[in-house]
Image (cartoon, helix red, strand yellow):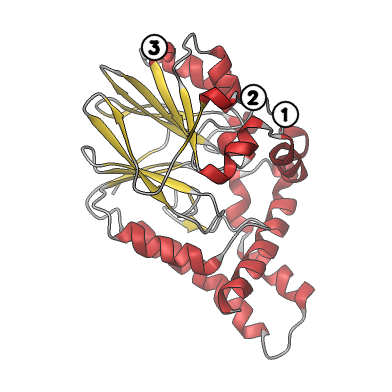
Amino acid sequence: MEIFDRTGEFERDLFYVDTLAHNMKRSIGVLVCRNKMGNIIFDSGMPNSSNEILNSLLKLGIDPDSTRFILLTHRHIDHAGGSAALLNKLHSSHTQAGIHPFSAKHLAEPSKVFEGGKELFGSFATRMSPVQNSSIRTLQDNEEIYLGQEVVEVIYSPGHTSDHISYFIPSKKILYCGDIVGSFNPKTHKVYPTCLYPSFDYQKYKTTIKRLRSINFETLVFSHFGVVIGKDTKQILDYSLESHQTLEKIVKEHNAKPNKEKLIQEIKVALKEATEIFPSAVRERAAEYMARGFLKGFYLSVS
């Protein structure tokens, strides 16, 4: 497997942009696909990420105003937060933000998403602006989005959240997985859960991973963080399952003598490396959110 973990072109007309979120490298990245008919930006980063994204496009020789779609994986502030700012700074009235139907209302009125983001990120979460309804495109499972001859397939992929979508570009054999597979450490090649409370559902996650395995992809793009390239890239799905099964084992070992707070502490310890995508000031809180998220999501799957 080849790993690409910086701002740049990793394949012809495919670019990865480090948004430098929270003043950190390798925290949040977005995918950009360019062709003669325009650009697609996959996810939008944090609310204050738009300048970094647009400046990076210019440095890469990409015209930001040719952007036709901003395709969002889900409503969380680190993925949808920058969508309104990007739209407002583009000199185009034709750009649309695509998202699951459930979350269209959260783009138009983002206060609830912002408050949730602020609980986790604290001062790193700047306020989100609303997206005009006319710029929102709701996306259905298996829908095909066309940009000239390029096709992007919409893949409903719940688990991390109920509204999560992944995107597959068949001509490039590339899958943009958002948060559903987890977070990826480009140095160690390890995959970590992104099982945030209260939206994680373990059974739906496993069902989605099974579906993604059936897709003929050879490049996997993470939001957190980097691009994995090669015919053996599907092994990453196995690593993802194994990382979740480690947490499952901890939960099952406690079932005979349940002590919820002790269990949460053990899961937090197991998730310590998973918090490295967050600013150091919020890592303890992130571990708590993920520990409680996995516990809730696990019991949802067995209820």
User: Where does residue 250 sit, x and y in percent of width and height?
Assistant: 61, 77
Name the residue type under label 2. Asn
On the rendered structure, is 258 left or right of 241?
Answer: right
On the rendered structure, is 222 left or right of 288?
Answer: left
Kindly identify the residue that appears in the image at 68 percent across and 28 percent down: 128
Kindly identify the residue that appears in the image at 66 percent across and 26 percent down: 130
Give the residue at mark 3.
Answer: 63
Asked if marks 3 and 2 touch (Cβ < 8 Å), the reply is no
Q: Which mark is residue 126?
A: 1
Q: Nearer the viewer, residue 174 or 70?
A: 70
User: Where does residue 245 sit, x and y in percent of width and height?
Assistant: 50, 72
User: Where does residue 185 sit, x and y in percent of width and height?
Assistant: 47, 49
Mark closest to the chain's N terminus, 1 or 3: 3
Name the residue type under label 3. Asp
Is residue 237 at least partly visible in the picture?
yes
On the rendered structure, is 234 left or right of 46?
Answer: left
Mark closest to the chain's N terminus, 1 or 2: 2
Above or below for 166 versus 300 = above
Q: Nearer the viewer, residue 140 or 168?
A: 140
Name the residue type under label 1. Thr
Give the residue at mark 2.
Answer: 48
In which quarter of the view is residue 140 placed?
A: top left
User: Where does residue 251 sit, x and y in percent of width and height?
Assistant: 63, 78
Label 3 secondary element:
loop
Quote the CA–CA distance across marks 1 and 3: 26 Å
